[in-house]
Structures are given as C-alpha cells and as structure tokens.
C-alpha cells in the first residue's frame, strides 16, 4: 500500500513543529512511543513492547495500538497544515486485525485527502519482529484544522 | 441516554472475572485507570487527570480517552459472555466531541446487542469536574467472543 | 434510548426547509422513503418493504438501511443549522445488528452534539412489524455545516 | 493504492456465485448498479449517474455511494469464502471525501484481512468523468462468514 521508495522528508521547520508538539504529548512519552519518520502527509510512530502497554493476554492493548495510530494520523495531517494552526482529531475508526505482538509496533498515518477544514487519513499499525512485519490494525481518521483560538 | 436508576450489579463471580482480567491489563494500571461499576452489560472505568495522559494542549489524549472507552465496552460485553471464553475487540469508532478535561474521565460501555459470536457496545466518555459532567467522546464497538484457544 | 414523551415538533419554517430538501433527494423518492417526524435535533424516516430495496436473502439491503439512516441524521442536524446553510455528511459508521425485516424500517437520527462547524448524530434503525420494533442497525455520523458556496 | 497490473480474475465458479447473488439484490438493480470486475479478494461495481440516485444538490447521494461500496466489499470478501457459506456485513465506516459526481461511480472493495469468521475490507469509491477519476469516498468494512443457517 505504501510505495517502498526512499521517503521524502518534511522540511526542517515542519519536522521541528511536529517534534515540539509530540514532546508536549505526555501520553506518548509515558507509553514510550517515539517519532521515526516525518514526511509530507505521512508520519510513523514506533512503540516498543513492554508490560506497561499490554492487555490481559500479554499483547499490545488496543488502546495503545490506537493511541499511536491516532497520533501518527494527526501528525501526518499536521505536516500539511498552514503555520500557526492546530490539529484536533474529530473521529477515527480502527479494526484490530490480528494479535498485536512483536518487538515493537509501527503506526503509519497517511493523508488520503487534505482539505482547508477537514483532512482524512488512513491508519495502519504493523507488529514488527525482526524482519517480519504483520498488519495488526487498520483504520481511518478525520482531522480538523483550527486556528489558534480553538473553536469548532 | 442511561437510565438514572440504581445500577444492578453483576454477580460476584462475574465481578471477580472482570477485575482479574482488568488487573492483567498493564496499560490500564500504567495509565492509572480503575473499574468503578460492573453491572450486567455495563461497565464504568475512571481515569484521573495527570500529565502522563495528556496531548499537546494539556487535555486528555484521544488515545487515553479511547483506551478506557475500549476497555469499558470490552468488559461490558464480557459480563454477558459464558464462562471460559475471552473477549477481543474487533473494531471501534469514536468521535471526540469536546476537549477532554476535568478531574477525571468516566468511560461507560453499554451493550447494545449481545450475540453468540458478536456483541456491539455503545461507548461514552464524560469529563467530570465537581458535579459537572460533559460528554467528551461517543463511539460504537464490535466485540467477538472466543473460546480458550483464540481463533477468529 | 429515546424518551417516549410526545415529540416537540420543529417550527413550520424548519419543517418546510427539511421537506423541500428531502423532496430534492432523488434517491429517497426512488427508494420509497418518506419523512415521518421532524423535531428539533431529531428526524424520523420510514421505508416500506418492497423488492426494490432488498439484498440477496430478501431482507432490506444494508445500503437501503444506511441510506435512510444517513438522511435521518443529516436532517436531524439540519434542523439546528442557521438559515441559508447546507449540510453535508462527513462520514458515518453503522453496525447491522440483526436481519432488517418488517413492514417498514424506521430510521431515527438524533443530534448528540451540535457545533458551529461539526455536528455529531446518533443513528438508529428499527424493523417494524405490527407493534413489534427491533433495533436492526445503530451508528454514528459526523456532519458539516457549510455556507452557500460549498467549500470544506 | 491498487497495483495497475492486469487483474487476475476469479474462477468461473466464483464469478457465477457472485453474479447470482448480486442478481438477487433488488436494490442493486433498482439503483442501476452492475458488477464490472470480480477478482480474488477484489470486486468493482459501477453506478451510472441518473436522477434516481441523487441527493438534494444533484450529486450522488451518500446512501447510493455507500450502498455500492458496501456491496463491493461484501462480494470481495465472498470471493474468498468457502462454498455453501453466506456473507453478511457486520459494520462499515465511510468518509465522503468530495462531491460524488461524474458519468458514473466506481466502487472497489478489497480484502485487507481474511479470517475464518471475520473479514475486513477496504472500500474506495471513485467519481469517473471521461479519463478523470476522483476518490470521492473511502471506508472500511467488517464482514462475517456464515453457514447456510444464518446465526451470529
């Protein structure tokens, strides 16, 4: 679904804007998640396996899987937003396709359609064990671009 | 939407089954979430406010909001499942309706339709500040009931 | 879920606005659907059973069920919009809970949260046979309020 | 998203099974929709423009767009199901991305994950005008495979 060409990276300004925002998300740090790719319209977030992010069977919790998927999509949209705007998630839907296991999860958010007000992203999460990647969740998300004084 | 009558509680056996499973969810403990009501077909989970569960503007992160909503729905379904079965989330959809703020969040999962294989739940999350309750998220979830050797 | 008090009806102006718009929806007439209740923030649409709206097993087709649910939600939101605006569906999610059968379907759209730009509705569809009503579908929908020159 | 190689077609038996089922869907014929491609795990349905499938602004109605998307996904899953089983839509979510216009719509359902009980499909709908194709809707769907005596 994703072309395996070398990813074009976002500009340094955009990368800094995304990283600064990510660093203010207490939840991402608390889960141990971090940004791995920031391309225009596409962002990857990694989440290493640890007991703090599991559900009752020892797999990654759907809530952790969803949290990084939601953030990856939100920041994918944010890479395309004008300066001095903010991004909010309006809604998302996610299917948990397979037990989420592996050394880490990789969430990829990709912009499907970018509008002035609303942006729609595709969400994918892979379980990664060595060289093996399994699609463990897939979803779709709607974002809204807001000006500095949040109203919607 | 929810009738404000005194909640009928689930049997001690069912309550124990839910609490034991919840306690094995590393993520719930790591976020600081806990079970508050376990009724037949309805479960409430509370999440106190703290920096570890925020997004970049200081509100509760959509991922944390969703995580407790997903768990509340999953356990609401689980209260109605036969003994010796497990519950898995097939998918859910959630709308973030308002900034998620307050002393704590209260997620309520309520079974809409319970089937032999599939169960559908309504998800609601309220931001609670003193006596003020605001609906901050609403969603819908599909669960699957699986026998001890997980297959689907 | 719905309070069984006598429904407060929308003003004649709003009712007319909704009926005029509905009459311009070629699909609703083609399916044989019609408006039955227009209350502030809540609209009901009925769809009588006939072969033209079935799927391969003779039940109402999920597409017909969804079409009236989507319209009921859209018009529920529209009852609360300012004059001279339009309504567009951003997205919706629907669970088909039971075989959709009966003399007719009744779709009910109810506003959960009304905002300046975005409105979120709950969608319910009942199969009605005599005095028996069965919830056959439930969903959630996001609408956008647009000014006369559509942009989003 | 879809590789532009020549599509491998489904076996004649599977094609016949899909066409027979489609022909029993009163709604598809009533809308004027027809099957165009039946490949393993992927089905395309076309819907020509006509007043009977419009909403109030003259575009294709979201209900018509969704109906063909739902059927395309359902039959995409059905191509991979064992003989003598049936397919039911559990739920789907769809974003309406742009005004749905053109000479016809093309809905493409593609299996993302096929399981013994549940199958998840990606849904895409394009507005086609001459050689111009615009993605007008995108969604995700969950299907269930049932044995001849429907239970779920």
Image (spheres, coloured by chain):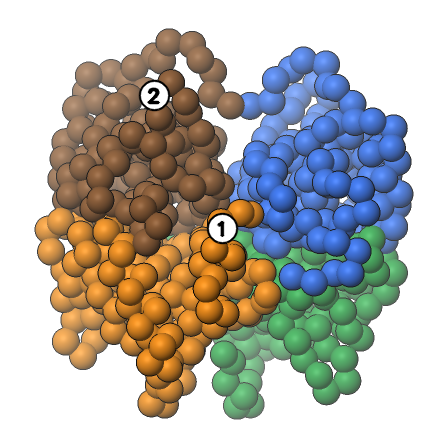
Chain colours: A green, B blue, C brown, D orange
User: In the figure, residue B109 lies in which quadrant?
Assistant: top right
Q: Position of residue B74 (x, y in %)?
A: 70, 44
User: Going by the image, does A91 lie left or right of C10?
Assistant: right
Mark 1 belongs to chain: D
Residue A130 appearing in the image: yes
Residue at 21% from the left image edge and 22% from the top image edge: C15
D20 to B80, vertically: above or below: below
Q: Position of residue D143 (x, y in %)?
A: 49, 58
Q: Secondary structure at mark 2?
A: loop
Residue at the left extreme of this rendering: D51
Residue at 81% from the left image edge and 47% from the top image edge: B84
Q: Quarter holding the C terminus of chain A?
A: top left
Q: Secondary structure at mark 1?
A: loop
Indicate which disc residue D149 carries: 1
User: In the figure, residue D3 lies in which quadrant?
Assistant: bottom left
User: Going by the image, does B95 lie left or right of B109?
Assistant: left
**Residues at marks 2 and 1 on the same chain:** no
D120 to C126, vertically: above or below: below
Q: Position of residue A145 (x, y in %)?
A: 46, 53
Observer-side mark, 2 or 1, equals: 1
Residue at 48% from the left image edge and 45% from the top image edge: C95
How many residues crowd around disc 1 within 10 Å: few (fewer than 14), some, or many (20 or more)?
few
Q: Position of residue B51 (x, y in %)?
A: 79, 47
Indicate which disc residue A142 carries: none
Residue at 76% from the left image edge and 80% from the top image edge: A129
In front: B20, or D21? D21
In front: D136, or C97? C97
The residue labelled by disc 2 is C130
Mark 2 belongs to chain: C
Q: How much space separates mark 2 and mark 1, taking CA atoms? A: 26 Å
| Figure label count | 2
């Amino acid at each position: 679904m994703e072309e395996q060409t070398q990813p074009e990276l976002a500009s340094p300004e955009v990368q800094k804007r995304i990283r600064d925002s990510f660093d203010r998300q207490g939840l991402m740090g608390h889960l141990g998640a971090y940004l791995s790719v920031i391309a225009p319209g596409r962002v990857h977030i990694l989440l290493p396996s640890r007991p703090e992010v599991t559900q009752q069977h020892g797999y990654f919790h759907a809530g952790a899987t969803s949290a990084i998927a939601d953030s990856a999509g939100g920041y994918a949209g944010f890479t395309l937003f004008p300066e001095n705007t903010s991004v909010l998630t309006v809604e998302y839907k996610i299917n948990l396709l397979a037990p989420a296991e592996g050394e880490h999860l990789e969430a990829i958010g990709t912009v499907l359609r970018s509008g002035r007000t609303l942006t729609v992203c595709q969400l994918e999460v892979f379980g990664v064990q060595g060289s093996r990647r399994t699609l463990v969740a897939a979803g779709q998300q709607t974002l809204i671009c807001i000006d500095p004084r949040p109203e919607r």
